[in-house]
Amino acid sequence: MDKKKLWGEQKTSILQFIRSIAYHRNVVKVKNDVKIDSCFWNATSTAHLLVATLEWSKVFGSDQSEKTHWKNTVNKEQEAAFNEVAIAAAGSKEEWTKSWKKMNSFRCQFVAHTDIASDLKSVPSFDIPLKIAVSYLKWMHDLAKDQNVRFSRNHDPELFYDNVTSESMPVITDGLLATDQYSEHS
């Protein structure tokens, strides 16, 4: 697969990851704010969390076992450069490693497989994975530009999460409020 196509697939996964995290967080926030407990909205929130985990894993999961893994698009020098970007985004190498392990465990033990013996106690925080994804998207755009690769549509990685969050909030709020009168069998 050529680099432009591979970067395009990575960008698609990262943008879907960002969207899904924003949607998940908005559903949780509105449900808590308006005190609505709905099987449908709980399942919707969970589905966005699961999709976010899978999309993140396509680019940052187990090293190179996924064709769209970030290490498959770079040479050793670029790999070292992005590792520095990721460490800066995470705050430290230890935080990046800890966050990666939690995300990978969540994916392997809960999202993609059911590990009955797992000691997984909670959903990981997606804050560091979100920072890493945004940093990678920005870094990838700069790298692609240096190699004269152009994408059809550029998103400002710094603003994308905030834009999706603010644009989806009224839709989610209206949807939750409009469905409050419906009861479901659990």
Image (cartoon, rainbow, N blue to C red):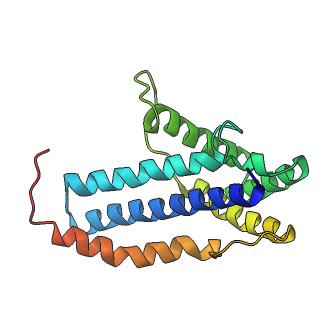
Identify which residue is drawn at 65% across, 40% down: 66
Residue 26 to residue 114: above or below: below
| Relative side of 74 to 67, left or right | right
Q: Quadrant of the C terminus?
A: top left
Residue furthest right in the image: 77
Residue 24 to residue 112: above or below: below
Identify which residue is drawn at 50% across, 77% down: 163
Classify residue 11 by image quadrant.
bottom right
The foreground one among 121 and 19 is 19
Residue 176 placement (x, y as % from top left): 23, 68
The foreground one among 147 and 160 is 147
Classify residue 121 by image quadrant.
top left
Residue 21 to residue 171: above or below: above
Residue 120 placement (x, y as % from top left): 46, 33
Identify which residue is drawn at 68% across, 42% down: 97
Residue 2 to residue 150: above or below: above
